[in-house]
Amino acid sequence: MALRAALSLPSALSVHKEGKASVSFRESIHFVSTATAKDCRKRDLSVGTIRAQTATAAPSVDEATSQQKKTLRKGTVIVTGASSGLGLATAKALADTGEWHVIMACRNFLKAEKAAKSVGIVKENYTVMHLDLASLDSIRQFADTFRRSGRPLDVLVCNAAVYLPTAKAPTFTAEGFELSVGTNHLGHFLLARLLLDDLKQSDFRTKRLIIVGSITGNTNTLAGNVPPKANLGDLRGLSGGLNGVNSSPMIDGGEFDGAKAYKDSKVCNMLTMQEFHRRYHEETGITFASLYPGCIATTGLFREHIPLFRLLFPPFQKYITKGYVSEEEAGKRLAQVVSDPSLEKSGVYWSWNNNSSSFENQLSKEASDAEKARKLWEVSEKLVGLA
């Protein structure tokens, strides 16, 4: 029973498909990097000619100053749920570079401050701001407060999540949405939409919007096929408001299931990232991405699960599936998606193989359904008051 329970959680079972993807990625890099010496000489001559033609042209003072600012200033990144787990590890990984100022957007202000100090984040590299993703009013207040701070916004990381696998009955957000979907999807959807203009205005070397996904929301994986499987259906529950009164608290209109609600919310996260990409990438140059950093079996995300599961799941992932990833390593992977130039491609769902090499992973049929993403976007706009 404990073994079966371990498989039903957001796990990181490695699949052969992922291994293939990583090999293909490396091969493609090797292919692109090959060039003949003759080609190289041609390019050198061409570059030399261009330089000779433009040698007398100097950038204006304003242009030079703008480029200098891009080089000198720290980037500003907002990380939701940064008081523990993956969010905290990511905040530390970014802050430790000295190249980023991290806005730790958290529900519990004091907890976040203590957490930052406990892992040694230098005070000048972070700011804690209150954000409750289960309240649309709190989200709007956060966006207003951040804007009034005068800081630029270069990257937004939507990381925070609610996971209630053993809940027998649904709980709800301030606006009456089922808590898991209301927080993980609707809360982040509103936050990202409100801060999109701030991201557009960034003059930093990179501007990105990242939404953390999950292998358990992908039914093209072994872990994603462990019941209850993610399934949004025709979105009838979401269209009805997920309030458990006039409609089902589940997106597909079915009976409440805490584990499925989490998985469904992760499908929404991945669909939302792709819809952002389709609507805004070409126009704005913002990179939109999702990722699954691996199974952090010791994370506080599992705090609501039964004690026996919490005892057995970490060694199961470490020694049986080999999918275990420490919080520190997962944080470095998410930080990589935030800032690494090699991961700047938009519309990608990133994963890592057993050698910790990143690759573009394939989403399930539902998690990559463009029409469902469009409908999800439109329904979500109405629910959060944007339409």
Image: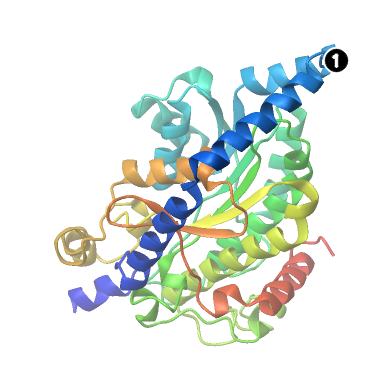
Residue under the image location 46 percent in, 76 percent down = 260
Residue under the image location 75 percent in, 33 percent down = 147
* Quadrant assignment, res 96: top left
Query: In this rendering, does residue 373 appear at all?
Result: yes
State how many labels appear: 1
Residue under the image location 68 percent in, 63 percent down = 175
Where is residue 221 drawn, in percent x and y?
38, 75
Disc 1 target residue: 60
* Quadrant assignment, res 313: bottom left
Residue type beneath disc 1:
Ser
**Residue closest to the eye, 110 or 279:** 279
In the image, residue 50 sits, relative to residue 342, either above or below, namely above
Within-10-Å neighbours for mark 1: few <14, some 14–19, many 20+? few
* Quadrant assignment, res 60: top right
In the image, residue 263 sits, relative to residue 354, either above or below, namely below
In the image, residue 320 sits, relative to residue 160, either above or below, namely below
Where is residue 199 drawn, in percent x and y?
72, 41
Q: Is residue 373 left or right of residue 14?
A: right
Where is residue 263 drawn, in percent x and y?
47, 71
Is label 1 in a helix, a strand or a loop?
loop
Q: In the rendered image, which quarter contains the N terminus?
A: bottom left
Q: In the rendered image, which quarter contains the C terminus?
A: bottom right
Q: Is residue 158 left or right of residue 47?
A: left
Where is residue 216 drawn, in percent x and y?
41, 71
Residue under the image location 62 percent in, 40 percent down = 155
**Residue closest to the eye, 254 or 37:** 37
**Residue closest to the eye, 352 or 133:** 352
